[in-house]
Image: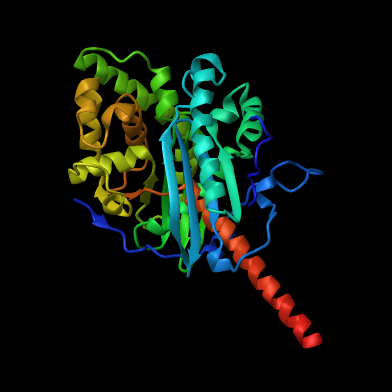
Amino acid sequence: MADYSPPPRGTNGQKSKRRSGNPSRDRAVSPSPNRPGGPGRPEPAWQQQVQRSAPFQRQAFAAIDLGTNNCRLLIARPQGENFVVVDAFSRVVRLGEGLAQTGRLSDAAMDRALGALHICADKLKRRNVHLARSVATEACRRANNGAEFIARVREETGIRLDIISAKEEARLAVMGCHLLLESGEGPAMVFDIGGGSTELVLVETRPDDTPLIHDWQSVPWGVVSLTETCQPEPDDPVGRAVRYERMKELVRDSLAPLAERAMAWLERAAPEAPLRLLGTSGTVTTLASLHLELPQYDRSAVDGLIVQSDSMRSLCASLAVMTPAQRRAQPCIGRERSDLVVAGCAILEAILDLWPAHKLGVADRGIREGILRGLMASGDAAERARATLREMKRQAS
């Protein structure tokens, strides 16, 4: 497999109809990021292949996304133009806890993340993964000891994490979820509310192809970083409302440059086209679950849902003034998300303030799926190249 090796011994919505896609076409998303590692460096570990190939359709591919709040793993095999998931794992690790105050990853946070990554490493071995890519995002980008933590992960688990840029994070999110955009051509805004940052990507959809990226921006406000910046949470409803407005203001101010550029482009290139919105994050999926009044989270009901923006705003306004205990009592929120969901709501409302679309698409997919599509596209191309070479040799013999 590509980025894993054993450690040393001793250590009221409606569903979107666009649900299929071709991984081989997902290579066309642009602009592509700069090659990791820089000039003169070897190819990144995630591009290496170290075991003999099985037939393409039987190969297992894996993606690990270590974010500021969650550690997620997805293992899948190609199936026609899509893929079928064979294993998955997700755990809240809060790697970025306290980062806003100290500039460092805490020992407790690193231990939590390592515990989750050990589980991921075990799954990679048991599933005999052929090719994998493991990425770390905003927490490791910002932390003074981020590189030290990456080295420790490699030594203790065998997983080689690639600290990706915000630009690459945005690109992967689009690759992973663009198939769920509301039907139609023209402009769309895809956003990913993370733990330590939020990425927004202005795209133009094209028939039978991946969206063309026109502009993007990453802001340092995610559910963890915004919550920690606006601490503590007041005890009274008025104080909570004031805090919530402060959160929205911080996000709106940060997004203002992209909003100006996007509006200028839209007025010039697509003045009549309605702007579509698609969100991928725990915030939007949690709100979609509350909108559907689900007793517990159901990915099949949420992924691809199209919801009226006013309904999402109403849910945000209600959650913003609830006490922590009231939020914990809500289905699909619970203790782990109760203190972070308000910040997620503030980020979502700030986005809706700047891009007042009537409807919002919901995606329970993103970076991991984007990684898998890229890996499978590369694997498919390599398989076809090997088949061509074999045929040439056969004809020459």
Residue 241 placement, left or right of 199: left
Tell me the quarter of the image containing the C terminus: bottom right
Most distant residue in the front direction:
10
On the image, the x and y values in percent for residue 287 come to 27, 39
Nearer to us in this view, 304 or 11: 11
Residue 344 placement, left or right of 225: left
On the image, the x and y values in percent for residue 43 come to 74, 48
Nearer to us in this view, 10 or 209: 10
Q: How many marks?
A: 0
Nearer to us in this view, 383 or 220: 383
314 versus 57 height, above or below:
above
Residue 103 placement, left or right of 196: right
On the image, the x and y values in percent for residue 117 come to 53, 36
Q: Is residue 267 visible?
A: no
Residue at (29, 39) in percent of width and height: 286
Residue at (47, 49) in percent of width and height: 74
Residue at (72, 82) in percent of width and height: 391
205 versus 135 height, above or below:
below
Residue at (36, 24) in percent of width and height: 247
